[in-house]
Image (cartoon, rainbow, N blue to C red):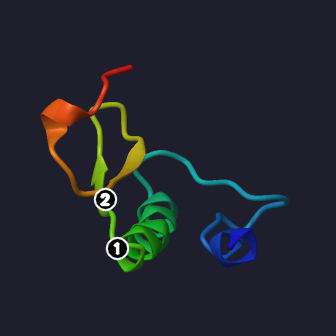
Amino acid sequence: MLAELEQFSEPVHGVTRLPFTPERVAAFDLPGLWMDGGGLTDALDDAGTLIGRSGGRADSCARM
C-alpha cells in the first residue's frame, strides 16, 4: 500500500506532498478508494484528515 502512495510525490528525494497540491489530492483519493472498497465512508474533517467510517448508529458510538 505504501509503495502505491509513493507515486504521489513531488520529484525530490523521499516523499513530499505539500498541502493544497495535486499530489496531496491524489494521495488522498487512493486510500479513499480503499476505504470505499472496505465498506467505509470516507471524508475529510476540518483539519484535512482523511477519515473512514463504518456504518452504524452515531448515537451508539462513544465520542473520544
Residue 38, above or below 47: below
- Position of 56 with respect to 51 (left or right) is left
Location of the N terminus (image quadrant) = bottom right
Say whether marks 1 and 2 touch (CB < 8 Å): yes
Q: Position of residue 34 (x, y in %)?
A: 46, 74
How many neighbours does mark 1 have within 10 angstroms: few (below 14), some (14-19), or many (20 or more)?
some
Residue 50, above or below 48: below
Q: How many marks?
A: 2
The quadrant in which residue 36 appears is bottom left
Which residue: 30% across, 47% down? 44
The quadrant in which residue 58 appears is top left
The quadrant in which residue 10 appears is bottom right
Which residue: 31% across, 22% down? 63
Residue sticking out furthest to the top: 64
**Nearest to the observer: residue 28 or residue 33:** 33
Residue 25, above or below 52: below
Location of the C terminus (image quadrant) = top left
Q: Secondary structure at mark 2?
A: strand
**Nearest to the observer: residue 53 or residue 45:** 53
Q: Position of residue 38 (x, y in %)?
A: 42, 74
First in sequence: mark 1 vs mark 2:
1
What's the distance in space between the residues labelled 1 and 2, CA to CA?
7 Å
**Nearest to the observer: residue 12 or residue 1:** 1
**Nearest to the observer: residue 49 or residue 60:** 60
- Position of 44 with respect to 34 (left or right) is left
Q: Position of residue 62 (x, y in %)?
A: 31, 25
Residue type highlighted by circle 1: Asp
Residue type highlighted by circle 2: Asp
Q: Please name the residue that numbered disc 2 is placed on.
A: 42
In the image, which disc is placed on residue 10?
none
In the image, which disc is placed on residue 36?
1
Q: Position of residue 15 (x, y in %)?
A: 74, 58
